[in-house]
Image (tube, rainbow, N blue to C red):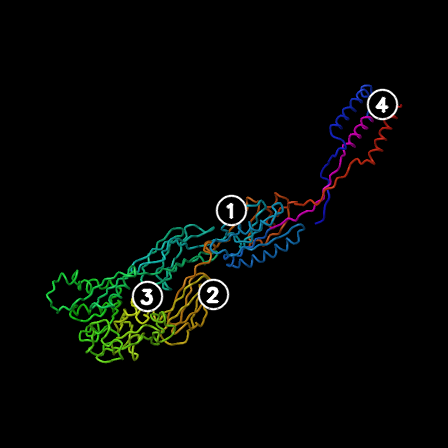
Amino acid sequence: MNTVSTVVGLNVTPALPLWVLLVLGVAGLIVLIPAFLNRTPGRWWRLLLLALLLGWLSGPKLVRQHWRARPDIALLVVDHSGSETIRGRMAQIDAARAQVSREAAAIPGLELRTITVPETGSQGTQLFAAINTALGDIPPDQLAGVVALSDGEISDIPVKPGFTAPFHLLLPAKGEETDRRLRLIDAPRYGVIGSTITLRYEVEDLGPAPAGGTATVTAMRDGAVLSTSTVPAGQVQTLILPVKQEGPSVIVLKASGLDGEASPINNQQIVTINGVRDRLRVLLISGQPDPGERAWRRLLKSDPAVDLVHFTILRPPDKDDLTPLDQLALIAFPERELFEQKIANFDLIILDRFQNQGILPSAYLSNIARYVRQGGALLLEAGPEFAGAGSIAHSDLGSILPAQPVAAAQGNDASLGLPAGFGQPAVSGAGITTAQFRPALTDMGLRHPVTADLPGVDGSHTPDWGQWYRLIDTTDVQGQVLMTGPANKPLLILDHVGQGRVGLLLSDQIWLWARDHDGGGPQAELLRRVAHWLMKEPALDENRLSAVFDGDRLHIDQRQLQANAPPAVTITNPDGQTSQRTMTAAGPGHAVLDVPAYAPGLWTVSDGTRTAYAASDMADPPEWADLRATATKAGGIVAATRGSAHFLGAGGTPGLRLVEAGNTEGGQEWIGLRRNHAHVTTGIALTPLLPGWAALPLLILVLLVAWRREGR
């Protein structure tokens, strides 16, 4: 900018004190009074002489200011939040940005500064926060206006703007838009298996949409349609769903589209419901007191989610020692109640060294077998009694067991927790093997989630665990052998029976680990995993495919018992587009895959056999709640600052004009930016009006004229 000079005022610097000038002036007027009374010629010249003299002595100076004009600054705000990615809005915004920049560059004295409003997490579009930050570097007297390229969905609109310059809103649309959204009012994150959950939602039609509309709402769980109903817009609806399975289930509510709506993205809501058991009801029957019984009881009682019912058989029914009945037990063994009336209420039945001594009628043992086939869970910890004549394998329970004892035990001391041959070389015979051995994992055990990641495994078949000393020999083995003892004899077997599951631990010495014998082992973790696998915990399924989100990453996890290469999975994003990716081996029978997944909605992963669902929440829910392009929300700011709103799709990008304040609203094809006339002073100059070299000749001239007039 060129420097401009202008006169801004008059200044006086008297040569004499003001009171002296005042005295001189009064004295001079007194002297002139007779001349004016007598109409003396030259009286006016005398008065002029007095005035010139006093003016000269007062030292009048002309004040001249030198200043340089400052540019007017316009702020261009470009909205890059998530809602600008739909319907080609970003292309319109970029084109408008380029045109505004070109026009601003062609206007003399106008400077354009551009800022971008990014995605802000979960706070919506923080447009005015970005404006206020940028205004910190712009003097208020230079701000010509704010031009915002946005859809008008602004989350931080203030009651009063922090500036007086015009606010112009340029919207990437043809006009006010409509939008339908499905709003989830109430949705629990957890549900108790066997009960129901209640979802409350509302379908809203926003914008200039006709009132009284209806929408078809479809409810799906893990890709399966649960219900379809037609609901009125604007009314809260209730949906009751049963909780049938443990673990996460993805519930999708999707409303039909509205003609002409901005986007169908917010027509659906996704919520993940985790099915949990109210309390795990476990029935523990101990055949006789032994050290393992205490380990079982301590483990189950330490879990606050477990309701434990425990009975110990102190003696067989045929033993008669004349002990009074009231001294044998606190209560009578409620066999009918447990094994007939309430057997279905238990999530798991554990038989610890239990033998068929006629304590339970065969009908009740048949009930246990039926309970398992219908979806129940049974865990049998076998001791020497399993190899004897009273083995429950010889009862109706034998039909569901994954292995049968080789023969009846003979010649073994089964009265103690350790066999008679404790610490001696292996002795095999009569259906029981007594030897020092460390439990080992089979190939299947290294792949099965129950045992694969136990502490100390590290991919080894023979982890450095403490030794055991007794194992029950079996035959007719079926199911999944996870652990073995001496000579690769089965030690831990899991099996599916009908709709239920059975576990068989062929040694009664896991309690040695609990006492840290020979270094101990993962007793509590192993038993916990076995129990939860039997109760069908999804995370322990041996063949499963799962997908979960961590931020904007989709984590896929697959377990399989077959020793196959890592599989290829098909990933379907919320838009229906599919892609195939090969998973990476993470261990025996274990493969993982981590992929970026930015789009919100329901993602589906399939390995050809199983399908997993994962729900990705929107990164900024307020941003996607209302997807209309609308000028109504920022209308108060536009009016208060004498700005304007223009739809880019209707009339194109309006031109820019630098105008005087009061005419900034603009017109159909242009918007006005305020001319501020801001400047900065660079210097001040004082110029004497009566310099000495001019004042003295002028005084002499006036004096001579006055004398000559009086001389006539």
Q: Nearer the viewer, mark 1 or mark 3?
A: 3
Residue labelled with disc 2 = 596
The answer to which of marks 1 and 3 sits earlier in the sequence is 1
Label 1 and label 2: CA atoms lie apart by: 36 Å
Q: Nearer the viewer, residue 258 or 396?
A: 396
The answer to which of marks 4 and 3 sits earlier in the sequence is 4
Q: Is residue 372 magenta?
A: no
Secondary structure of the residue carrying tag 2 is strand
Residue labelled with disc 3 = 537
Residue labelled with disc 1 = 158
Relative image position of residue 611 (x, y in whole percent): 38, 68
Q: Nearer the viewer, residue 343 or 322?
A: 322
- Quarter residue 382 falls in: bottom left
Relative image position of residue 682 (x, y in whole percent): 70, 45
The answer to which of marks 2 and 3 sits earlier in the sequence is 3
Label 2 and label 3: CA atoms lie apart by: 28 Å
- In the image, is 165 to the left or to the right of 204? right
User: Which residue type does callout 4 highlight?
Assistant: Pro
Q: Nearer the viewer, residue 461 or 577?
A: 461
User: Which residue type does callout 1 highlight?
Assistant: Pro
Q: Nearer the viewer, mark 2 or mark 3?
A: 3
Provide the residue span drawn in magenta. 45-74
Secondary structure of the residue carrying tag 4 is loop
Residue labelled with disc 4 = 41
The answer to which of marks 1 and 4 sits earlier in the sequence is 4
The answer to which of marks 4 and 2 sits earlier in the sequence is 4
Label 1 and label 4: CA atoms lie apart by: 78 Å
Relative image position of residue 401 (x, y in whole percent): 24, 73
